[in-house]
Amino acid sequence: MKSFLKKVSWMFFLKLMNKILEGAKAISGTIGFNFLPKELRQVTFYSEGKNYWPHLKGLLETTLVKTNKKVCYVSSSLDDPGIKINHPNLKTFFIGMGAVRTYFFEKLDTDVFVTTMPDLHKYQIKRSIYKVHYIYVQHSLVSLHAIYRHGAFDHYDTICAAGPHHVKEIREIEKKYNLPKKKIIKLGYSRLDDLIKNKNNTDFNESKSFKSKTILIAPSWGSKCILESGLGKNLVNELLSLGYVVILRPHPQTIKFAKQKVDEIKQQHKNNLNFIYEENIIGDMSFYQSDLMISDWSGVAFEYAFAFNKPVIFCNVPKKINNTNYDDIKLEPIEVFIRNSIGVIWDGVSPIKKKIELCLIDKENKSNSLINQHCYNIGNSDEVFAKMLNTNFFNLTNDQF
């Protein structure tokens, strides 16, 4: 018993020391940013953590190549790949997630601030006391009025729209709630462009080595979604019993809030060679290795369908609605109206085998013909972003760029 208590105490001590060390690094990062001459922080990118790096990677790298801007990359995660980039025009900083981050945002002094984080100025993260132009970049193709909370984008100056639906939604939100008109950049979706660019990569294509058909389970997060609801456990069992290889790719928020549900599935199938657990969602290997995806309301299904033209089975769990006022905006969310066009809908109860066979027989969906309808600047969004920064877009009217 003494040995166990000693071990627990030691683990607690190590955890406490790591937390103190991380806090010190966050303070150091904040001080370092604030002491940097203003001319060296013209454009600041902020990432909530490594999972958002795929959405900022192309924009940051192209900004460094295509502009002469002095850029900072700030992250709340020490393992964010963006922090490790070296470039003469780039400075990187770690600021953590707690009170230090709150202070950082309050005293932020930069010309342009770019992030994928919604809910600016609604909770603990406020706009700066200084004059800063805030730009929101999409980290999903889903709707802005249903999936995100009410007012999630009200305090941004510029919204980068991935597709026409985002433009319509923002303008309707402004009209409905009598909000000032924002600048909207018809940007596109950098993450999708990167997937399309890499899909012919030889290393990725040669990674598909499974003899059986491979199914990727990649749901959204929330109490009614596939994993949290308990449906995921039965689904994995059924797919493995049918002889499929199963890749489970939970959303990071599921791991955070429903870890026990995920751990139960991992434990049950830890010795099954046909079961693969993918925790690191910044990797793309499962997209290339799989033959089809099973999802619910996750935006990753659009990326999968549009980039690879592979089928998606949508589990018909209750809609994911994070904005109780979403009905105020009389626009059908894209995640609702596009489902039948890029995949098939499964009720979550009947045997899934027939749905899978249907998808694999008619493997190619209609995504190729839909992608240009729902996404701007396919393959070119990063360059459009750099052009925006090179243009004096602050002085343009809201509809000029």
Image (spheres, rainbow, N blue to C red):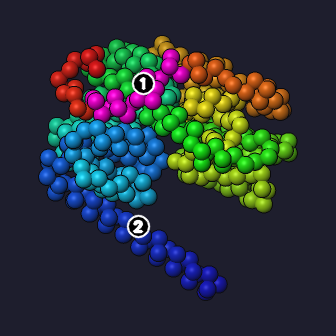
* Tag 1 residue: 377
Q: Residue at x 27, y 29 (%)?
A: 388
Label annotation for residue 278: none
Q: Main secondary structure of the magenta part?
A: helix
Give the residue at x 83% y 33%.
353
User: Residue 25 sits in which quadrant?
Assistant: bottom left
Query: Residue 188 at what x, y percent from top left?
Result: 42, 27
The answer to whether residue 251 of the structure is visible from this angle is no
| Residue situated furthest bottom in the rendering | 2
Question: Image quadrant for the C terminus?
Answer: top left
State the residue in front, 209 or 124.
209
Q: Which mark is residue 19?
A: 2
Classify 88 as above or below 284.
below
Left or right: 246, with 194 as reference point: right
Q: Is residue 384 magenta?
A: yes
Image spot of residue 10 (x, y percent):
51, 79
Question: The magenta stretch spans which residues?
Answer: 371-388
